Every structure is written in C-alpha cells, then in structure tokens.
Amino acid sequence: MASAQDPTTNGFLTTHVLDTARGVPAEGIRIWLYKVTAEGQHKIAEAITNADGRTNEPILPKEAFETGQYELIFFAGDYLRAHGLVKEEPLFLDHVPIRFGMSEDDHYHVPLLLSPYGYSTYRGS
C-alpha cells in the first residue's frame, strides 16, 4: 500500500465534470473528497472545477495518495440552478456522491457526466 510518507508513490486522483445537457465542461462545481474508513468518512480535500471542467491540480496528489475507499461529492445543484437547467425544488440531483476504491498505486480518474436528471461515471485515464 502506498502511503503519504512514501516518496516513490505513483498514485494520484483526478476528476472532471462534463455537462451533457449543454455539451460543455462544467465550470464552477464544488467537489469534496472523503477518505472512507471503518471509523467513518473524513474530508481530506476540496476543489472547484475550472473552465475545462477539471480541477487545477489532482484532487488527491501523489504526496497524499493512499489506497483505500474514497467518496467524491459533487455539488451539482448549485451549477444546475446557475445555468437554468432546473426550476423545481427540491432538485432531482443536488449533491452527487460517488464512492469508489483505489487498490493500486496508480493514476485514478473519476469523471462525472452530468445532466439535470441523470449522471454516469467510470474509471477514466
């Protein structure tokens, strides 16, 4: 298992968000990253997507990488409201959680493809 103290780690985590309803990168989405353990979940990072729908830096950089269970929370509702993509409250999608495991010392990429009434994700590259 790679650890934050291991200078030879190659692992890191990136993410991005694409607005599939408008066909553009989703700029300005707040993202929180949690490490999930037997004791609960602990917020370890946060970022906001840039004009390319990506975070400016890996949300979990090499120097902080550890294998394990994680959860990304995408604050999609604020974005959907700001772009007039939804009108009713409560929103069908507001906070979008994606829980996933990282078992290798490798680059993990977890994108979010977002629309007002659905989303998908995958392990990207």
Image (spheres, rainbow, N blue to C red):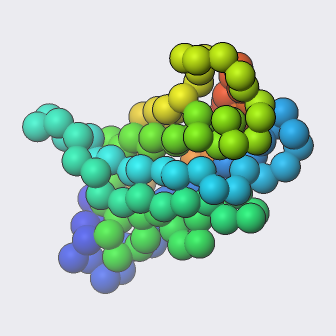
Q: Which residue corresponds to the image point at 63% horizontal and 56% vertical from the top-left?
A: 28
Give whichever of 27, 64 is nearer the camera.
27
Residue 17 lies, with reference to residue 49, above or below; the image says: above
Q: Which residue corresponds to the image point at 35% horizontal and 65% vertical from the top-left?
A: 65
Residue lying furthest left? 39
Q: Percent position (x, y) of residue 77?
A: 58, 34
Q: Which residue corresponds to the image point at 45% horizontal and 41% vertical from the top-left?
A: 73
Residue lying furthest bottom? 7
Give whichever of 62, 59 is nearer the camera.
59
Q: Percent position (x, y) of residue 101?
A: 40, 41
The answer to whether residue 109 is seen in the rendering is no
Q: Quadrant of residue 114?
A: top right
Q: Percent position (x, y) of residue 86?
A: 72, 25
The answer to whether residue 17 is seen in the rendering is yes
In this rendering, the count of numbered labels is 0
Quadrant (top left, top right, bottom left, bottom right) of the N terminus: bottom left
Residue 13 lies, with reference to residue 18, above or below; the image says: below
Quadrant (top left, top right, bottom left, bottom right) of the C terminus: bottom right
Q: Which residue corresponds to the image point at 58% horizontal and 17% vertical from the top-left?
A: 89
Is residue 109 found left or right of 33 in the rendered image? right
Q: Percent position (x, y) of residue 64?
A: 32, 69
Give whichever of 109, 73 is nearer the camera.
73
Is residue 119 found left or right of 69 in the rendered image? right
Give whichever of 67, 49 is nearer the camera.
49
Is residue 11 found left or right of 24 in the rendered image? left
Residue 84 lies, with reference to residue 48, above or below; the image says: above
Residue 57 lies, with reference to residue 79, above or below; the image says: below
Q: Quadrant of residue 2?
A: bottom left
